[in-house]
Image: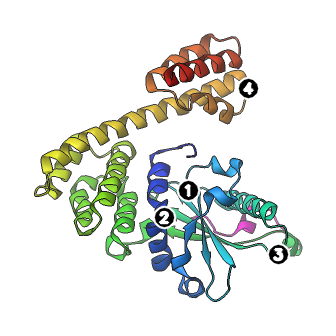
Amino acid sequence: MGRINNPHDRFFKETFSRVEVARDFVENYIPSRIAALLNPGTLKISKDTFVDEELEERFSDLLYEVELKGKGKLFVYFLFEHKSYQDPEVALYLLMSMVRIWTSYRKQEKKGLLPAILPLVVYHGKNKWRVKPTFQDLVDLPDIMRPHVPNFEYLIWDLSRYSDQEIKGGVLLRVTFLLMKHIFSEDLGKLLPGFLGLLEDFGDRRTALQFLEAALRYLSSGSSHMSREELVSALKEVFVDEGGDLMATLAEQWIEEGIEQGIQQGTMKVLVRLAAKRFQVKPDLVYSMLVGLKTEEIEDLAERFLDAGSLEQVRVWAEEKRMARAE
């Protein structure tokens, strides 16, 4: 599993890693002119097949493949990206991702045409998405040069432009989008019982429970307007006839883990910036030293970053911690 940038990335990945959710999205949100070409039943995740290590580090990216109707083994690749803020350069990153996917594909398939890639962006920030979706809008480009510069347009789904009633699809997709849409809202506590109540109509109880766990961790670490008590209260209200006390106990555990994750991610983010600046290295190098450490070890590591004479001394200490725990 790739690295986790923030709670929004984690929840998006955990949800859209389910094929049924991605298929639901394709059937309900892909423009009909494109959807008519696809065979949704062939949709499957292909991240481990064609995405190289550099792309795999980007936790929120998901790559699916789907066959075209009546075309044998011709594919379209869906590159999912998620944003909780305005990113003017998302088209540049998508282009980099697409080139890496094609390059990796070519290493495995030595001849033939490259597969089509459809870049998709799901956005759930506070303000409406205002970034132009075409790549050439990023380039200082005289008109005479346009034919010689790459260009494409990504599809953008801005959840702020949808009413709650307009968010469609199956239960997991609807609850996912409703939570992401309202994660920054002050009235989230009032809306939450209604959102979670949709899970009562989901037939697979095990899957529903797994999803609920991911959702509560997301709410506890991604929202600044929900208290622990409000989360537990909402859960009791929804599942009062289905072991409400047990669900509340589980919720306490998941919420605590979500808070812990939020604290750890915040600590890591600050530590990475400080250490990268002190030792004049790329943040990714610092981050690689933190993977697998517990919160208290990361806090201890902060002092070592201040006292160490070199970054190598810190790396050795972190590796010793990981190895000692594995014994």
Query: Which mark is first along the chain, 4 or 2?
Result: 2
At a point 58% along the width and 46% down the height, the residue shown is 2
What separation in Å lies between label 3 and label 1 (alpha carbons)?
37 Å
Q: Is residue 226 magenta?
A: no
In the displayed structure, does residue 250 sit left or right of residue 148? Answer: left
Q: Secondary structure at mark 2?
A: loop
Q: Is residue 204 above or below residue 304?
A: below
Decide: marks 3, 2 in contact (CB < 8 A)?
A: no
Q: Residues within 10 Å of mark 1 (few under 14, many from 20)?
A: some
In the displayed structure, does residue 217 sit left or right of residue 142? Answer: left
Q: Is residue 141 magenta?
A: yes
For the record, the magenta segment spans: 128-142
Q: Which residue is mark 3?
A: 112
Instruction: Tell me if residue 319 can be seen.
Output: yes
At a point 17% along the width and 46% down the height, the residue shown is 246
Q: Quadrant of residue 147?
A: bottom right
Foreground residue among 262 and 248: 248
The kind of residue tagged 4 is Gln
What separation in Å lies between label 2 and label 4 (alpha carbons)?
37 Å
Q: Residues within 10 Å of mark 2 (few under 14, many from 20)?
A: some
Q: Which residue is mark 1?
A: 86
- Which secondary structure dominates the residues rendered in magenta? loop
The kind of residue tagged 1 is Gln
